[in-house]
Image (cartoon, rainbow, N blue to C red):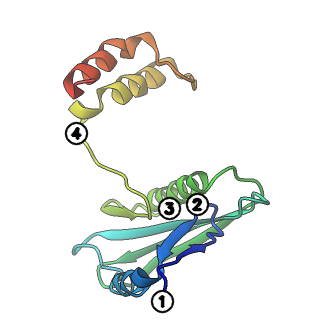
Amino acid sequence: MHCKDIDIEDPKGKKPLTMSRNHATKAITRQANRIWEPPPLGWVKINVDGSFIKQSGEAGAAAVARDDSGKVIFAAWRSFEHCDSALGIEALASVEGLCLAIHWRLSKVILELDFKVFQVKRECNQVANVIASLARRTKHSVAWWGQAPACAKDHLIADCINAGI
């Protein structure tokens, strides 16, 4: 048997998946062992996901919140007629889930999704913190491409020096 690559279409518009025939069984087995795990006692876990069709831009977002016993707190979904990317709909699903958590006054929340998000201390996130403070003080919304406001300049330089870049 030849070790031929198999291309698998991904309807969400993410990167095409490729796996070799001789590794297909191992990959499927590993994935079958992955199961939903409940949150710690007293916490709620919100699982979110997005579905995206690149050709049409159609998308859907879903959020399901469960407690530590697996009981559904809420399940919600929303349709979007025009979306630009899989990452965009994943972000919208996250926002939907968190907004519902706020609406129903859930305080101990774990957000679980299929891309990585890291929690960092404020000291490691000074650039965003300074800009968030700017937004609060000025009551103004802005998005810039390729630059940040002057108030963040020193923090940007410090980040680069500390990261060795």
Up-down relation of residue 143 to residue 82 (above or below) = above
Which numbered disc, 2 or 4, marks the residue that appears first in the sequence?
2
Which numbered tag is attached to residue 121? 4
Name the mark nearer the viewer: 1 or 3.
Answer: 1
Q: Does residue 141 appear in the picture of this structure?
A: no
Q: Does residue 108 appear in the picture of this structure?
A: yes
Name the mark nearer the viewer: 4 or 3.
Answer: 4
Which numbered disc, 2 or 1, marks the residue that appears first in the sequence?
1
Give the CA separation, mark 4 to mark 3.
23 Å
Give the CA separation, mark 2 to mark 1.
30 Å
Which numbered disc, 1 or 3, marks the residue that appears first in the sequence?
1
Secondary structure category for the residue under label 1: loop
Which numbered disc, 1 or 4, marks the residue that appears first in the sequence?
1
Which numbered tag is attached to residue 97? 3
Residue located beneath label 2 in the image: 14
Q: Are marks 3 and 2 in contact (CB under 8 Å)?
A: no
